[in-house]
Amino acid sequence: MSLVITNIGELMTQDPRAGADEGVLRDAAVVVEGERISWLGPAASAPAADLSFDAEGRALLPGWVDSHTHLIFAGDRTAEFEARMAGKSYSAGGIAVTTGATRSTPDFDLTRLAMGRVAEAVAQGTTYLETKTGYGLDVENEARSARIASTVVDEVTYLGAHLVPAGTDPDEYTGLVCGPMLDAVRPYVRWADVFCERGAFTEEQSRRVLQACRAAGLGLRVHGNQLGPGAGVRLAVEFGAASVDHVNYLDDDDVAALAGSWSDWDGQGGQGRRGTVATALPACDLSTRQPLAPARLLLDAGVQLALASNCNPGTSYTSSMAFCVTTAVLQMGLSVHEAVRAATYGGALALGRESGSDTDGSRAVGSIAVGHRADLHLLNAPSATHLAYRPGIPLTAALWRAGVRQA
Ligand SMILES: [Zn+2]
């Protein structure tokens, strides 16, 4: 079955190979065949298809790619949030509350909760999702979280190194993360992550985790530089991690290392050495009252940027990528095009799913190009500018995920 979406007022492709006008087309059409995009161009020359959808002059973007979430959890941390809003500062320890609730929740309920969160994200325009383990923190519960995650999202990350459980020796626990726990989650995950932060894992412990997970064939990511300066960014670049996330407290060397990691990359077909994406998590920054990550400075330095929701019960209980884009424009100094790019193509880069990341492009998401997965987001607005111009207004008018209409 084929579908032509026609009369698109603004088609923001976010395809880095589309040269002119930053890949934005006016009066455009897109044709979808099955799961893939098969054609795009001027509406006047669109080929016929089995079905037709009139976009009525509205804007079409790639679906959001949310490259950083923590959706496998049970329980609630409203009280912690209230305390924080009353002036108490955030520390990494709140994770333990969620771990207790998650461990005591049966598979069926944990799956149902995660599916509900995915549905909430999709209803707001997200079409490709990563999520992490990290609220199990023992072999059985990390493996269970990974297995459940693999049934509800597109990409799964092992985050056994989220927090050292209370009453456990940190080095002993790190050994568990690098050994039996890693073996148990391995069938379900493509990525590994470590929370390299004061109160979580030290540089040395983080290094052990990254070494073991790399040796197991996993792609790497790092939670780093969230609550203060630290080794996270440096480690991520040294290990060739796909992304380092949070990046609130950066010194000049951190920024130079991130920029340097992209120096051999052509920025188009994925040729040359890929670097480490810096993932900003503005909803988390606001919810923890931390300074927003210096996204403008990173872009100006030549760093590839992603925006993600970091949806989790402690520090960012939202999956709204539109909110992240709005914040990036209004408060972080990004243009609308840059913010949308970071929330689509940037997320795909952070997950190794950008254009050119495989031989036929069939796994590519986050940009609108022939052969890519048909993840398409129609806004109830004539241009993407309305995401920032009309903050807080739900603008998702229609959504296709792998060619299937969702909303
Ligand atoms: Zn996180």
Image: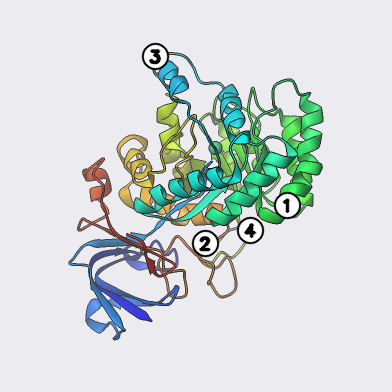
Asked which secondary structure carries label 2, the reply is loop
Residue type at mark 1: give it: Arg
Circle 4 sits on which residue?
A: 273
Q: Which residue is label 1 attached to?
A: 186
Q: Nearer the viewer, residue 207 or 16?
A: 207
Residue lying farthest bottom? Answer: 48
Mark 3 or mark 2, earlier in chain = 3
Q: Residues within 10 Å of mark 4 (few under 14, many from 20)?
A: few
What residue did someone put label 2 on? 354
Dot 2 crowding, Cα within 10 Å, few <14, some 14–19, many 20+: many
Q: Earlier in the sequence, mark 1 or mark 2?
A: 1
Callout 3–callout 4 Cβ contact below 8 Å: no
Q: Residue 34 sits in which quadrant? A: bottom left
Marks 1 and 4: CB-CB under 8 Å? no
Disc 4 residue type (three-letter): Arg
| Vertical placement of residue 227 versus 8, above or below | above
Question: Left or right of 157: which side holds 383?
Answer: left
